[in-house]
Image: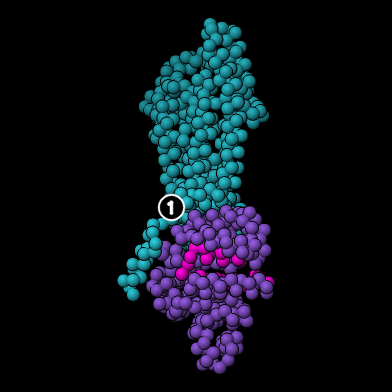
Chain colours: A purple, B cyan
Amino acid sequence: MNIIESAGLGKRYGRTWALRDCTLGIPAGHVVALVGPNGAGKSTFLNMTVGLATPTAGAVRVLDGVPAGSPDALDRIAFVAQDAPLYKNLPVADMLHVARNLNRRWDGDRARSRLDRLGIGLAKKVGALSGGQKAQLALTIALARRPELLVLDEPLATLDPLARHEFMQSVLTEVAAEGISVVLSSHVVAELEQVASYLIVLGRGSVLLAGSCASLVAAHKQSVEQIVLGYLRNANMEVAA
Amino acid sequence: MTALSVRSARGASPGGRPVRWSRLAWVTWRQHRLALAGTAAVLGAISVYLFIMGQQIHDAWGKVAACRPLGSAACQQLLDAFNRDYYGSTSGSVMSSGINAQTVPFMLLAVPILLGVFIGAPVLAREMESGTFRFAWTQGCGRVRWAVTKLVVLGSALTALAYAVSLLFGWYFQPFFAEGKTGKFPMQLFGNLGVSFAAWTLLAFAVAAFAGALIRRAVPAMAAALTACTVLDVATMMSIRQHYAAPVTSAGGKPPGGSAAWLLDQWLAGPGGQRVSVDSVQPPAGLQASGPGAFQSWLQSQHLTQWWSYQPASRFWPFQLIEGAWLLAVSAVLVGATVWLVRRRAA
């Protein structure tokens, strides 16, 4: 089964295509890294996948054929947007309660024990948490929804190196325990090498490369980072020429 | 594959029922309880004032009404004191007469729009400004139910609170109606009585929420909604309200119903019914001094008739309901448009 399937997917903002002619079939059971420079169309692709944006062209389906953004898709996909937006003025406990009341599936015990392990107090205001704690809280809420697919948009962008490492460890632990699929975007390639098992490279609004890391490494006889950099460099030269 | 996707799209997941409205209502309450508490505090302060002053006014009016013999100098003195103490002077500028039953209605007139706009504008705009809509709109309940809950819960709460205040105002002002001091049609009274006060609060809330969803920033949305609502309110008071029903015309010394009717126009007509310009009519000097009937008999001798056009006092409630109905309809359309904006808005 494919967790994300897109055919001729495109999104235009005004007169600029943020993403065009994107045809992908991402198999389930992977940690998928969506990489590319800023403005490559990563957020646009993820926003359409989670139903925040509607495609200008083509279509995207999730979880084996469910239309993106449909009630069923919303129910089964958890999304953490860039900068992990949460209600800053609420205490952590109330933030959890808000999330519980906005969802049909909710595992409150799991959320509380996870926050307990991380040392994030329930009485603390969300706005008073550090960047790393806030990202962890957003991840905790996403996981408490018991999703089949977890989508993270630039989860590492605002974190310091230690927090990045801890965050990715958390994701990997949970993924291993639950067997859920994860799609995460990043403009930093280095951190993803150890965690990603499937790679999609976007450049200037189109898909440059997609495949499982193992097969790509075997075919190119290079590290993932070298492969990505090679493709991005080629794409830039094509535009320059 | 197609069969599978259709089945799962219709909700094959556990339960199959959407998130309960009561849960969504709790989220609205938790996020907006400070705004609601502020509303309650403002309206509470107004209510305390209306209640305390209303008690005094009713006590004083009770003494005036019980005074016997009617028309005696002592009773007239009591009535004059009542008017002076609570209604304020009717000569000179209303604005300089202090806070009394004459000026309080004007101040209250601003409350529905200010309240509706300050509560309504941030409801969606704040989420868009801070980016939290990306959290809210990707939860299992879906953005449409989320938005509908917010708008319905907050809109109903505001409308109910406003209606309670306008009931209290009606009680506070009632002795002056009993006295025959004024009718209920002057704009500063009509807007605070009946369903008008609550309906304008709801309209301002709906306009502001819509502006917030459209502009996506709370403060500019407040400014836009404040302007739009003020223009509409002034237009209604000045020129729309009087057309809710065709006015009644009558000939004679004065319109039936006295000060309770809403006088719109008066003119003189010749024997054929044609209007006569006021400048061409020259009543002899000293006619006014010889009594109210003198002018009418002089008009008769000139074959002229005085005409009045007015809305009778009995139309107060029909007019209230007409105004309430169109404000409710416009608010409902705006709430629908706001939900539509939320639905189609892309991240």
Query: Which chain does the residue under circle 1 lie in?
Result: B
Q: Is residue B23 in view from this perspective?
A: yes
**Based on the displayed image, in which of its 4 quarters is residue B85 positioned?**
top right
Stretch in magenta:
A135-160
Which of the image's four quarters has the N terminus of chain B? Answer: bottom left
Name the residue that disc number 1 marks: B20
What residue is shown at x 56% (from left), y 64% (from top)? A140
The local secondary structure at tag 1 comes to: loop
Count neighbours of disc 1 (C-alpha within 10 A) and say few if under 14, some if 14 to 19, many if 20 or more: some
In the image, residue B172 sits, relative to residue B71, either above or below, namely below
In the image, residue B73 sits, relative to residue B337, either above or below, namely above
Residue B230 painted magenta: no
Q: Position of residue B217 (x, y in %)?
A: 58, 57
Q: Position of residue B11 (x, y in %)?
A: 37, 63
**Based on the displayed image, in which of its 4 quarters is residue B99 positioned?**
top right
Q: Position of residue B185 (x, y in %)?
A: 49, 30
Dot 1 amino acid type = Arg
What residue is shown at x 41% (from left), y 27% (from top)? B314
Is A228 left or right of B252, judged from the image as shown?
right
In the image, residue A200 sits, relative to residue A47, either above or below, namely below
